Image (tube, rainbow, N blue to C red):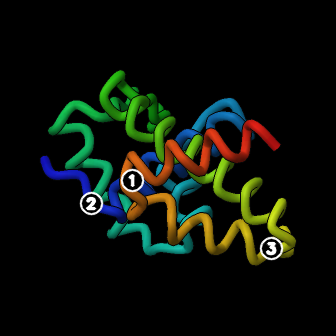
Amino acid sequence: MNIYESAEDYLEAILILRERNGTVRSIDVVHQLELTKPSVSVAMKRFRENGYIEMDAEGLITLLPPGEEIAQRIYDRHKLLTRFLVQLGVSEAAAAADACKMEHDLSDETFAKIKAFTLNC
């Protein structure tokens, strides 16, 4: 399964919801990403089939190691890019929104340079 931006967003949302609530169900993802139940259901099925998540009999979603790795990578990028943009003087809301757009498209090289710069400030 190729991981596209939308798939990264789903996995990141699962991670964020887990950190916030302790458990995650599909309906939580629906609300977090403001999507329809059928869209999320189809995505969760694909993630299960491809080994990114598992769901128990009660519908609780668990990230498996491949899904956890992708989610953590994207979420770490999001947090660092938000912090970087705020340091530049961008408002928190605009920085978070822009980080969502940037987190998927920056090269590893560019992200590493931003990370090094941000950590040295």
- Mark 3 vs 2: CB contact within 8 A: no
Q: Is residue 57 visible?
A: no
- Which of the two discs, 3 and 1, sits closer to the camera? 3
Residue 68 drawn above or below residue 114: above
Q: Please tell me the numbered disc located at residue 93.
A: 3
The quarter of the picture where residue 97 lies is bottom right
Residue 34 vertical position relative to residue 112 in the rendered view, above or below: below
Is 42 on the left or on the right of 32, as rendered? left
Residue 27 percent location from the top left of the image: 53, 56
- 84 or 16, which lies in front? 84
Q: Identify residue for label 1.
A: 8
Q: Position of residue 13 (x, y in %)?
A: 54, 51
Name the mark on residue 28.
Answer: none
Measure how far apart labels 3 and 2 are at the Cα level.
24 Å
Q: Could you tell me which secondary element the residue under label 2 belongs to?
A: loop
* Mark 3 or 1, nearer chain start: 1
Q: What amino acid does circle 2 point to?
A: Tyr
- The mark found on residue 4 in the picture is 2
Q: Give the residue displayed 54% in from the left and 47% down from the top.
A: 113
Residue closest to the eye, 78 or 106: 106
Q: Which amino acid type is shown beneath numbered disc 1? A: Glu
Check contact, mark 1 vs mark 2: CB within 8 A: yes
Q: Label 3, label 1: how many angstroms apart (C-alpha)?
A: 21 Å
Label 1 sits on a secondary structure element that is helix
The amino acid type, in three-letter code, at marker 3 is Ala
